[in-house]
Amino acid sequence: PYTLSLHDALPIYREGFKMDEFKGTRGEWKVKHSESKTAYNIIGTSLGGKYKIARCPYIKDDNLPEKINNNEINEAKANAQLISACPDLLNACQAFMGLFRESDMRPEDESYELADIIQNAINKALGINQ
């Protein structure tokens, strides 16, 4: 079976292999705590692109135990970090699928199941067949 090597995958990943074009905000996404709200913002960093992409709010209540407040904050931050990684994850998944299509794998190989999961995630990210 075909082995996906980092050597093979990196050039495709760097080129940004595109099976279907992502129509969202281009460029790197970062997490920044809101200056005015109890929330983490996911922001775009490309000039001319949309600045605020998403917001992950949390509830901070002085009447609640500190542990509950910290759990709310940590969960919101973790969600924001995952969202900010989405463009990189999409590119990596698309690069994998590009290599997979060029491989000599057969439908009975276990990798087909993984490829199906990855393709479904790509389709979900791009709003295909939803």
Image: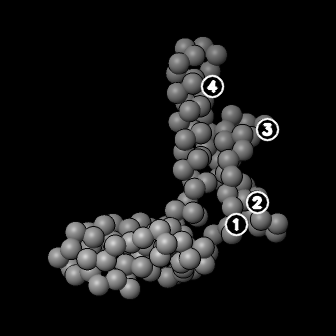
State which tag comes first along the sequence, 1 or 4: 1
Q: Which residue is mark 3?
A: 35
Whole-angstrom CA distance, mark 2 to mark 1, is: 6 Å
Mark nearest the camera among 3 and 2 is 2
Residue 42 shown left or right of residue 86 in the figure: right
Front residue of this view, candidates 16 and 4 = 4
Residue kind at label 1, given as amino acid type:
Gly
Mark 4 / mark 2, whichever is N-terminal: 2
- How far apart are the alpha carbons under marks 4 and 3? 15 Å
Question: x and y percent of residue 34 in the render?
Answer: 74, 40
Bin the neighbour count of mark 3 within 10 Å (Cα to Cα): few under 14, some 14-19, many 20 and up.
few
Residue 93 sits above or below residue 72 on the image: below
Q: Mark 4 or 3 closer to N-term?
A: 3
Residue located beneath label 2 in the image: 45
Mark 1 to mark 4 CA distance (whole Å): 32 Å
Residue 70 horizontal/vertical position (percent)? 57, 24
Name the amino acid, label 3: Glu
